[in-house]
Image: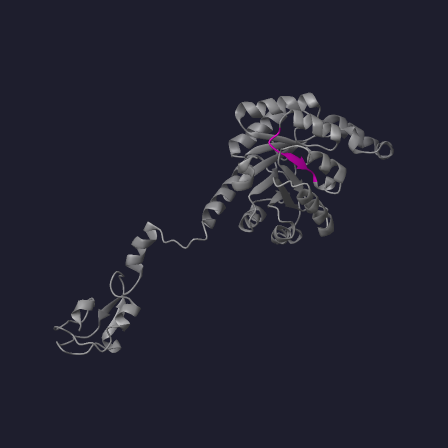
């Protein structure tokens, strides 16, 4: 099991088809992902088998796009080898049994199932034969369909699986994100819930992190005008670097649920908190009362609960206004 996927912040750069069929652009995108701090890159194993022949006949312009963006086994092998070379995790989304077999032969760190195939149970069942973690996006799916998949995972005892909250709009508006679905799916599915992020910026990702996600998928591009299918809403090199930095900082901000005062806070506490001081002179044998006490900075002296125990006790000596109270002044 790839423990990092399940235990740490894990960011997948979704290259998809933004390489436009060019191996040199695929390499550029891998380098962008690595330099920005992504943990993995993911491609999409496009080919003509995704569409029916009748549909293609009615949409002939699509054929050119398919030919341009189709990813061959040799293409994937070359980018896989490059990922090994620069030490970044690799995967691709398969859309057929044949593509799953090709992907598995390249030993990916995980298998990714696209949102549109969440209901493609035959494909998912085939992927469950392999030891790699499986990551499934939930865009386009209602709860009944998501629950069907989570039950299948449990039935097949596939524990190294992650579901990704996803809105299959490119890009979605803020009121279309429904980030609280993450909490709902965590309880309902009993699997880690990550986030496949088609939004712009990092606000939604930070919300997902706060809600308990640690796996993030984000489309990247060389630049937004390069003409890739997803390039307009994808993160460019500057965007993805800022995105990751924001997530890292947000994770640090979350800290832990153990209430602990840092050494820096302890030093500040001694200045910011209040201590008990006298606001009147007190003679030896005179009782200490609340009207003779004022709580002022700095801290480090007696606080309210300690002063409360001294009320109406007699002073052992003469004390001056402005003096810091101490327990041994009274009997």
Q: Quadrant of the C terminus?
A: bottom left
Whether 183 is among the magenta residues is: no
Residue 117, percent from left and from top: 73, 39
Q: Nearer the viewer, residue 269 or 223?
A: 269
> In this rendering, would 111 be left or right of 271?
right
Query: In which quarter of the view is residue 289 placed?
Result: bottom left
Q: Is residue 226 visible?
A: no
What colouring style does the render use? Answer: one colour
Q: Residue at x 57, y 33 (%)?
A: 40
Q: Residue at x 62, y 29 (%)?
A: 108
Looking at the image, is 22 positioned above or below residue 8? above
Q: Is residue 279 visible?
A: yes
Residue 281, percent from left and from top: 16, 75
Magenta stretch: give its range.
108-114
Residue 97, percent from left and from top: 74, 30
Looking at the image, is 311 positioned above or below residue 15? below
Residue 1, percent from left and from top: 57, 35
Query: In which quarter of the view is residue 228 placed?
Result: top right
Q: Nearer the viewer, residue 302 or 67?
A: 302
> In this rendering, would 154 be left or right of 311?
right
Query: In which quarter of the view is residue 81 placed?
Result: top right
């Amino acid at each position: 099991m790839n423990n990092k996927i399940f235990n740490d912040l894990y960011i997948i750069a979704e290259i998809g088809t933004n390489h436009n069929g060019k191996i040199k652009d695929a390499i550029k995108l891998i380098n962008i992902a690595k330099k920005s701090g992504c943990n993995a890159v993911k491609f999409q194993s496009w080919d003509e088998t995704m569409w029916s022949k009748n549909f293609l006949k009615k949409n002939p312009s699509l054929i050119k796009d398919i030919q341009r963006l189709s990813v061959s086994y040799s293409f994937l092998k070359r980018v896989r080898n490059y990922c090994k070379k620069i030490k970044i995790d690799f995967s691709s989304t398969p859309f057929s049994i044949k593509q799953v077999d090709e992907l598995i032969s390249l030993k990916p760190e995980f298998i990714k199932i696209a949102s549109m195939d969440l209901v493609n149970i035959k494909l998912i069942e085939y992927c469950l034969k392999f030891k790699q973690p499986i990551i499934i996006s939930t865009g386009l799916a209602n709860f009944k369909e998501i629950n069907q998949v989570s039950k299948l995972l449990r039935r097949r005892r596939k524990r190294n699986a992650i579901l990704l909250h996803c809105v299959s709009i490119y890009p979605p508006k803020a009121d279309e994100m429904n980030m609280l679905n993450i909490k709902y799916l965590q309880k309902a599915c009993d699997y880690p819930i990550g986030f496949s992020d088609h939004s712009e910026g990092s606000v939604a990702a930070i919300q997902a992190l706060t809600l308990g996600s640690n796996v993030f998928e984000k489309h990247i591009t060389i630049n937004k005008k390069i003409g890739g299918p997803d390039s307009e809403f994808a993160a460019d090199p500057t965007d993805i670097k800022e995105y990751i930095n924001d997530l890292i900082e947000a994770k640090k901000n979350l800290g832990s649920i153990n209430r602990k005062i840092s050494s820096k806070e302890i030093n500040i506490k001694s200045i910011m908190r209040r201590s008990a001081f006298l606001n009147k002179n007190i003679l030896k044998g005179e009782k200490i009362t609340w009207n003779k006490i004022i709580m002022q900075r700095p801290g480090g002296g007696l606080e309210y609960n300690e002063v409360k125990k001294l009320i109406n006790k007699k002073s052992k000596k003469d004390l001056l206004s402005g003096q810091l109270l101490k327990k041994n002044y009274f009997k």
